[in-house]
Amino acid sequence: MSGVQCLQLDVGNSSAKWRLMSGAELIARGVYRRDDEDSRTRLLACSDVVQAIWIASVASEEAEWHLAAMLEERWQLRPWFARSEARTGTLINSYQQPLRMGVDRWLAMLGAWRREPTRLCVVDAGSALTIDLVAADGRHEGGYIIPGPSLMERALLLDTDRVRFAEEAVYDLAPGTSTAEAVRHGIALAQAAAVRVALEQAGEPRPRLYLCGGGAETLQRLLGGAGDWIPDLVFDGLEVMAAAQGRDRDPM
């Protein structure tokens, strides 16, 4: 897609990250929220000459329909929605029903696999913490889905009347000396421990660790700097799948 302007979106349940590429060159990036008019304006003003729109989405069908309609009205292009597959290239899905795997997980694995086709542990730290293992021959060994920090905190505050705090506290592994610290540090301990136990459970050869998602930088710090933090890993996987389907050669 040399020179072709391609708008790529990574759509979650509450917001979407987007980036505009011209061939291999990053032109612009941002965050879109459906109820935020400013973010909508910035997205729709990113370019007048978008020639392809690729989307990775874990949002509802209704949210996808609204997004697709908005983008098609702006650029007269029908977006392509990536979906998890039984196999993409040499990466093989373990799910009997591949479509039931969140496409963000599949694309993150694809992005990591393109970088290094070896045994992998791919961690996406977002609303949920997902941990996926890939064998050296490209087989998905399986994975874990764990509530992310915000979901853990919300569940704790909703279901325990006496756990309340107003002060801020960062995520850290030291024992907390206030309720705020005890909650945040406990969540940090759970997130970091989940990744460490998953790596231990994986056995040998030890997988190469890749991290992505909004909480990946914090998680990497909690893990003592372990792994490779690749913020655009899902976008990278989106490009891999598009290439496998020939969309990089035919943007329309």
Image (cartoon, rainbow, N blue to C red):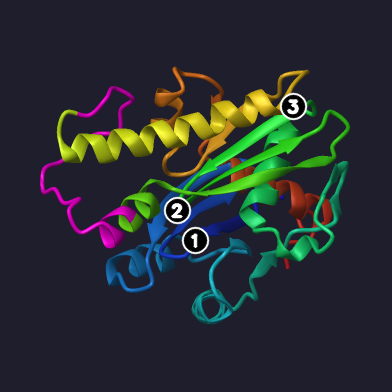
Give the side of residue 57 with respect to residue 92, left or right: left
The image quarter containing residue 32 is bottom left
The magenta stretch spans residue 245: no
Q: Which x, y percent locates residue 123? A: 58, 38
Task: Identify the element where label 3 is drawn.
Answer: loop
Q: Is 32 drawn above or below residue 94 in the view shown?
A: below
Can residue 229 be seen in the rendering of this structure?
no
Q: Is 37 drawn above or below residue 189 in the view shown?
A: below
Residue with the mark numbered 2 = 127
Three-letter amino acid code at disc 3? Glu
Residue with the mark numbered 1 = 12
The image quarter containing residue 161 is bottom left
Three-letter amino acid code at disc 2? Ser
The residue at 46%/23% (across/down) is 223
The residue at 74%/27% (across/down) is 116
Task: Identify the element where label 1 is drawn.
Answer: loop
**Range of magenta residues:** 156-176
Q: Are marks 1 and 2 in contact (CB under 8 Å)?
A: yes
